[in-house]
Amino acid sequence: MVRATSVPAFPTDGGWRERVNGVYATSVGARCSSITAAGTNLSSRPATSVTEAPRKGRSPLPSGRSGGSFPAAYRGALFFSDRLRDCIYALLPGNDATLAGLAEARTGAAVGAGAALHLMVEVGIGGAFTVDGRPSTGAHGAAGEYGHQPYGDRSLFCPCGARGCWDLAVDGRALARHLGAPAPADPRAYARRVLDRAPGDAAARRALAEVAAALGAGIGALVNVHDPDTVTLGGLAAPLRAAAPQRFAAAYTDGLMAFHRGQPPPVVDAVHGDDGALHGAAILALDEVTSEAALAGWSARADR
């Protein structure tokens, strides 16, 4: 999956967000004199330095400025300075699927769900499991790599190093195999083309039905794992289901444990579309800025 970046930082009077070369960013900078317009290329910013924060101690603010104490979330973050705007801001890494799942739980299709599972298909499939609007990210931030569950063909090796990954059964690579075509250089674009030609192409419809069934079966397995209130679908997952809804529904139901079948969790389309990760990055940044530690920092600086 594409990596995404959330950029909360220290309490601020300005902020910006942008998407640059597939990387999502939401920034909240310290001592910024103005709000920077969205869409600026990050590589063109006159950052005077990039410094990694230590695991302990005070923040190493660039340009010779003295550091201050920072929340634990900032340990290991990258700190940038922008000389023109007199800004200092921090970059924290995040996954696009996790951020999109956060957005759906807070402001999207899973609002009100105590436990929600978000899944998105792009190149492979990833997602997030949220409880009370907060994603479970695991010990190393790598939770939600659902595409590397062994729900696929065990004869296939995944680039991740595992055998039989679900990734290989639910994206453009799977469609190409079902159509007898070479592996596509761009699985996402290939899947879009197959979806577009399906109304007049029986072979494309058959391939999509196989992929929709693989998607439904895997989601059933994950419902057994997580017991969510609802499941949301982002990226290509929604149109893949829509291409063969009966095959998807049958595979989903067949994959559920018996006690889930009476009232299975609804599977609904995400509402934020391709901007899900951006919405999630903004939410994550606001969470950090309004956290107890950040608000305490505001108060301490105001008292100086």
Image (cartoon, rainbow, N blue to C red):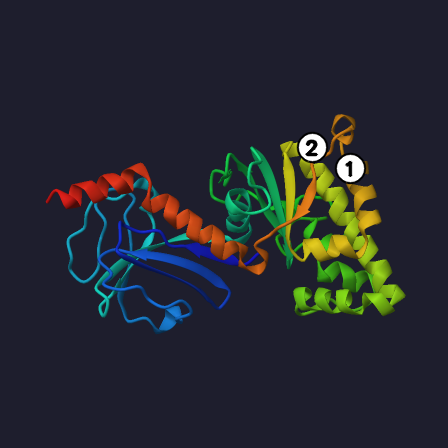
Instruction: Please state if 129 lies on the left or on the right of 301 as rendered.
Output: right
- The answer to whether 172 is drawn above or below residue 301 in the figure is below
Going by the numbered disc 2, the residue's amino acid type is: Asn
Residue of label 2:
224
- Spot the residue most to the bottom: 44
- Spot the residue most to the top: 259
- The answer to whether 299 is drawn above or below residue 183 in the figure is above
Q: Residues within 10 Å of mark 1 (few under 14, many from 20)?
A: many
Instruction: Please state if 211 lies on the left or on the right of 128 as rendered.
Output: right
Residue of label 1:
255
- What's the residue at 67%, 54% (across, down)? 158
Q: Secondary structure at mark 1?
A: loop
Res 78 → quadrant: bottom left
Quadrant for the C terminus in the image: top left
Residue 280 percent coordinates (x, y): 48, 51
- What's the residue at 22%, 57% (across, down)? 31
- Spot the residue most to the left: 304
Q: Secondary structure at mark 2?
A: helix
> Closer to the camera, 108 or 191?
108
Q: CA distance from mark 2 to mark 1?
A: 8 Å
Going by the numbered disc 1, the residue's amino acid type is: Gly
